Image (spheres, rainbow, N blue to C red):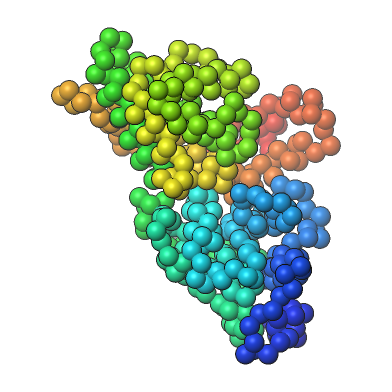
Amino acid sequence: MYGPIFFDQFPCTRASKKESVDINPVISIHIEYIDPLLEILGWDVANKKGLAPQYREVIAENYSTKTDRPDYSLTLRGVTKLFVEAKKPSVDISTTVDPAIQTRKYGWNAGHKIAVLTNFEYLIIYDTTTLPRVDDHAAVARYKIYRYTDYEQKFDEIYNLISRDSVYSGAFDEYFGERFPDGQNKTQQVDAFFLSQINEWRVALSNELYSKGGRYSSLEVLNDVVQEFINQIVFLRICEDKNLPLYHNLLDTVADETALHAELEKLFRSADKRYNSGMFSGENIIFDLNSNVIKEMVEGLYYPRSPYLFNIIEPNMLGKIYEVFLTEQLILNDTRIILGKKKDCVNRSVVTTPTEIVKYMVEKTMSLVCHDKAPQAIKKIKVAENKTPYLIHFNGTAA
């Protein structure tokens, strides 16, 4: 496919195979090495095809600024399939722990099967279906490792694993789906893990309030107020990771337990004023909760106790978690509050439409209808789902 002549464009591959990589630190590792490597693998890094921003094959972060996102997102028609994290050649990624944990956290939070870490001297593929832990060493969950001297000899193997052709042909999903089945490590996957943590908070908060009696003796009231409080805390944490403006850091509010309740209430009021969504406008339960319960919950959303990167977790995954969350309700078991399935959900499971299919349907329907229309005209379009699956009508006309 690509022979030694193609790889001769890289300075380090022109050197003796016995020599270590000698890359000028002034030269950008991305532009001189990683970008061309991805292009060899078929990825349109520079968007030479002129695709719309939402459908670019490769989304690269700004090399000159520090970000908390992966350096490259490789996509299938706008849906990210895997991340590539790049490091300087001076970083020995074969043994250094932090880059390995960072790369695995990116892939794990996105629900991907794998993620790639490279400084060009090494290209490492990690299994990201297992929960990354603080005390893991660099080799944990390492699926493949290649040194630059392997690239020519093992190019076909690398190409079959992470090339554009592999992703767009479906071979990527088939291959890694067989090696890392969805049922494997299910409890360690981000959606199940986060849901489990939310449910623990749900039970802890409910029992704390139920012990106070009064209006909290009603399970209906408990279900509502606890769900609302969890929504508020998670929303603020997501805003923080996405760098949306807030009164101050959520973690700062629990630093001083004596001022915790007042500081959290102040943050809620600030969020209500800024976002005006109604989420924070109701009666809150802050002052009815023990400060230890709130502190435990908030600290559980931050590193190192938390593996979550809310700027990486896709909204559709949060939606899926929330849908499953709503299938359960608080029930009284003797004197303790526990969770149980709602009657109408006992024999049902939540199945969401894959993002790739949703995007494809929108592209083939809505994009055609919205083409060349002004925003005001688009707002007037009416969409209704027909009883026939996936048949959509626009203003009464079948698409």
Q: Position of residue 79 (x, y in %)?
A: 62, 51
The residue under the point 75% across, 65% down is 28
In depth, the one of 189 and 397 nearer the eye is 189
Q: Is residue 52 above or below residue 41?
A: above
Q: Position of residue 68 (x, y in %)?
A: 61, 49
The residue under the point 27% across, 24% down is 207
Q: Is residue 94 above or below residue 396?
A: below
In depth, the one of 110 and 397 nearer the eye is 110
Q: Position of residue 156 (x, y in %)?
A: 61, 79
Q: Position of residue 321 (x, y in %)?
A: 44, 38
Q: On the picture, is 102 further left or further right than 295?
A: right
Q: On the picture, is 126 further left or further right than 399?
A: left
The residue under the point 52% across, 72% down is 94
Q: Is residue 34 above or below residue 216?
A: below
Which quarter of the figure has residue 123?
bottom right
Q: Is residue 382 visible?
A: yes
